[in-house]
Amino acid sequence: MKRILLISALTVLACLNMQAQKNKRSTTVVFTPQWTAQSQFAGYYVAQELGYYREEGLNVQIAHPNATQGSDERIKSNTSQITTLQLAQAMQLIDQGTPLVNLLQTSMNNGLLIVSRRNMNPMEQKGAKVALWRAGFTQLVECAAKEADLQFEWVRAANMINLFVAGAVDASVAMSYNEYYQILQAGIKITEDNIYRFADHDCNIQEDGLYVTREYYNKHKEQADKFARASRRGWEYAAEHPEEALDIVMKYVRRNNIATNRIIQRKMLEEILRLQLDPDSGEREFRIRPDMLEKANDLMLRNGEISRAITMEDLSR
């Protein structure tokens, strides 16, 4: 009798273990931020390190993109299930035939800049050589240049700061939370007369959001919603505890061998958190604003970046 009970108990334990393994496999999510480890993605690192994803029953693997496969390629191929994209980038992907769902909109403002070396407004430098990301995020920049008929000579590079510092280009595209601070840290003096801030020129279009394919969302709605909820908690914690969040960011920076420093990452986190505040309410609303989506549609349609207007229905859960 004891032997029978022991066998039964072992059988039950084996079944439970098999079910646990099955559940673990079914809740594994690969998440890819759109760039290398940095404060731009602090909220996701916080959610991972503080166990917010785990509390939702998710086994999250954070896989940063590389030079041969960006976050957009990873989500299209289902190599990653969830990624961050700029709104304009997501709109273009939808227009090209990859339906996407916006799970969480973290950016409420635009941080895009063009910075000139020539002590003049970069939008007055017709025909200038301008460094631009090889990895993408170019939709709004190219639209603005077309609208102003600037005929820029785009110089695409993985590290545009090196070109800018060396004087190999007249100007460079930059993010207010990233390349801009790198330029300043390199010892180059920049005044506001040298900068074109897109947000100040009727181009304040939201940037980073959290996306999955429509197909994935339809099959894994609960899982995707849990990821969004935990990610929001991560960002809210980062806003309330920025130094602790920075500690976590630097852990990922070191793990991924990123050439940066805590000063740059602190500046980046401060700016990222500022850009998350809605320009009207001053709150973190974590939503796409219909007026900014309309503005993006107008600009991108006029300049041939998309062939149809992308609606809130296209993007919504």
Image (cartoon, helix red, strand yellow):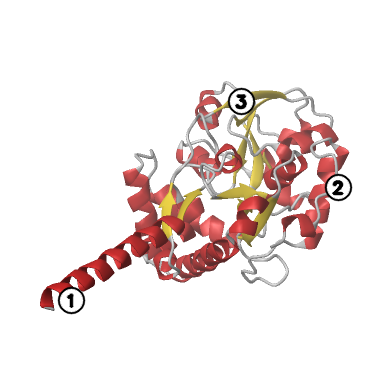
Q: Are marks 3 and 1 in contact (CB under 8 Å)?
A: no
Q: Residue at x 68, y 43 (%)?
A: 89
Q: Residue at x 27, y 70 (%)?
A: 12
- Kind of residue at badge 3: Arg
- Separation of residues labelled 1 and 2 (CA atoms): 72 Å
Bin the neighbour count of mark 3 within 10 Å (Cα to Cα): few under 14, some 14-19, many 20 and up. some
- Quadrant containing the C terminus is bottom right
Closest to the observer: 274 or 47? Answer: 47
Bin the neighbour count of mark 2 within 10 Å (Cα to Cα): few under 14, some 14-19, many 20 and up. few
Q: Look at mark 2 in the image and give the residue it sits on.
A: 298
- Kind of residue at badge 1: Leu
**What x and y, as percent, mark residue 296?**
79, 49
Helix, strand or loop under label 3: strand
Query: Does residue 25 appear left or right of residue 207 in this picture?
Result: left
Q: Look at mark 3 in the image and give the residue it sits on.
A: 156
Q: Residue furthest front?
A: 1
**What x and y, as percent, mark residue 78?**
55, 43
- Separation of residues labelled 3 and 1 (CA atoms): 70 Å
Q: Residue at x 68, y 24 (%)?
A: 154
Mark 2 or 3, nearer chain start: 3
**What x and y, as percent, mark residue 315?**
72, 56
Closest to the observer: 126 or 219? Answer: 219
Q: Residue at x 69, y 46 (%)?
A: 90
Q: Are marks 2 and 3 in contact (CB under 8 Å)?
A: no
Q: Residue furthest left?
A: 2
Q: How many marks?
A: 3
Query: Does residue 88 appear left or right of residue 167 in this picture?
Result: right
Q: Look at mark 1 in the image and give the residue it sits on.
A: 5
Closest to the observer: 62 or 28? Answer: 28
